[in-house]
Image (cartoon, rainbow, N blue to C red):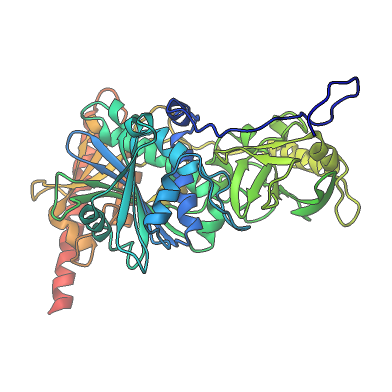
Amino acid sequence: MPYEPGTVWQYEVPTTGSTHLPPDAGYGKALTNQGYGFEVAVADLIDNSIDAGADKIVVHFLRDAKRILTLLVIDNGGGMDDVGLDTAMTVGRRREYGESTLGMYGTGLKAASLSHAASLTVVSRTKRSRAAGRRLTAEGIEDSFRCDTVDPRYAQELVDRYDGVIEWHGTVVRWDQVRVFETVTAGQSDQFLSKAIARLETHLGLYLHRFLQGGLKLDIAVWDVSSGEGLLGEEVDHIAVEALDPFGYKVPGKAGYPRTFTAPVEGLGDVQLTAHIWPAKSKQAGFRQIGPLTDRQGFYFYRNNRLVQAGGWNGLRNPEGHLVLARVAVDLPSHESSVLSLDVKKESVTVTPAFTLGVEKALDTSGGTFRGYLSDAEAVYRDGAKRTEIVRRPVTPPGKGMDPKIKRVIKEELSEKPGEDPIAFTWAALPPDKFFDLDRDNNCVLLNKAFRGDFNDGRRGGSNDAPVTKALLYLLLEDCFGLGRWERSRQDRVDYWNTILLASVRVQQERRTQAAD
């Protein structure tokens, strides 16, 4: 019925028709300024891979002698055909999401990618379709959201290059003209990549830790396309991402924990809160290496096993130093909720007062209160603060060339010197009378590559090979870096270490020869 003015309140706004208003090309600028951090954006791409059923994913940095070129994410998921690619690359188009998927809003691939790169290319193949690809660029969006079709010959070539990951099906996402890469000055690529990969490894290890614990294989690799042989050049770094479990303590800080509290939340029903108390002064990676302790206390929200908020009290209370041992796991419902809502970047959760009121009323099976849990966590912290702790000398951290698992243990055991570049390990051409040498200007331990095969059973090892040798050299040589004046006593120590280690490797060579005869 047509609207008739009157004095009665209109509960619904009357309308007279509708029209479709497609987005203006200027929307592309908003799309590229969503505030995605680099690690958050890469994690969003990996979410798509997991949704596609991938159990093997590689984050691949390509560089040459002068600069960092490209970032790619490769997976062995189900892949997409031409129709699927068009859907995935359509700005503002939302696909159907299942109850168990990580995607929610349909904007992640485009917004995450174009927030960092001027060009996004997706190449994919399925069991039943040939390799195909699409490219979306900042210029294309301004040109009425134009999407380019990738030459099918190149699409097949790219898939073939990654046949170690993609077999019968899979996807490659490629970023070109990555803005942060273009700010790296000549000669600084190694330092930039070392720090960027460390941050990315921590972020992925934390936010995807349940998937990694469940068998997901996730690697980060760096290849130099200007060296070595083959289409991709030579691998210069490789890291297998390990799970960083924020609840991965060996023994809880207080007996009887973790405990599950049930919070009656209006509009949502009963919400389970799994309350944990870390042991005081823990050095485990899942406690200390995921960010400032004050920021990491509080709620850890998960959606479909994917961590979407790592700490924070969401208005329940302010963070406090004596509550750093308190962490609470909450699994969100997979469906959208008016009480708990997840932001587009999957980095934080917004709650209504109904949630905090429910938490304040939460009880465990014996009638214990959530407030009592917080008191227990505070008491464990205060008791731990009374204990005297042996303070170990801080060290310059190990870097490129050291296996990530060893680096993680070193971080757990020893604090790092602030502002020091990590100590790298690399094989180099050295005189036959030297087992190792020091490049103190570049914080690097050089190992004589003539002996590399002796530590890899005669085979060429990867970038993180000879883990025992490198770890021992790190412990011996760490205090030789970051010094001012180079003392003669230190040089003498390096010289006799070199002589003894050289004799040791000669003995090892002799024993290998005898065993082969």
**Residue at image point 27% right, 58% down:** 159
Check the image and report above or below for 487 versus 375.
above
In which quadrant will I find the C terminus? bottom left
Q: Is residue 392 left or right of residue 436?
A: right
Q: Position of residue 161 (x, y in %)?
A: 24, 57
In the image, farthest residue toward the bottom: 517
**Residue at image point 38% right, 41% down:** 197
Q: Position of residue 113 (x, y in %)?
A: 41, 38
Of residue 198 and residue 424, the one placed in the foreground of this image is 198
Q: Total marks drawn? A: 0
Q: Position of residue 5 (x, y in %)?
A: 84, 21
Check the image and report above or below for 513 versus 162.
below
In the image, farthest residue toward the front: 2
Of residue 422 and residue 487, the one placed in the foreground of this image is 422
In which quadrant will I find the N terminus? top right
Q: Is residue 335 left or right of residue 378?
A: left
Q: Position of residue 91 (x, y in %)?
A: 46, 39
Q: Is residue 325 visible?
A: no
Check the image and report above or below for 86 versus 321.
below
Of residue 290 and residue 497, the one placed in the foreground of this image is 290
Residue 293, quarter of the rendered image: top right
Residue 177, quarter of the rendered image: top left
Q: Is residue 299 visible?
A: yes
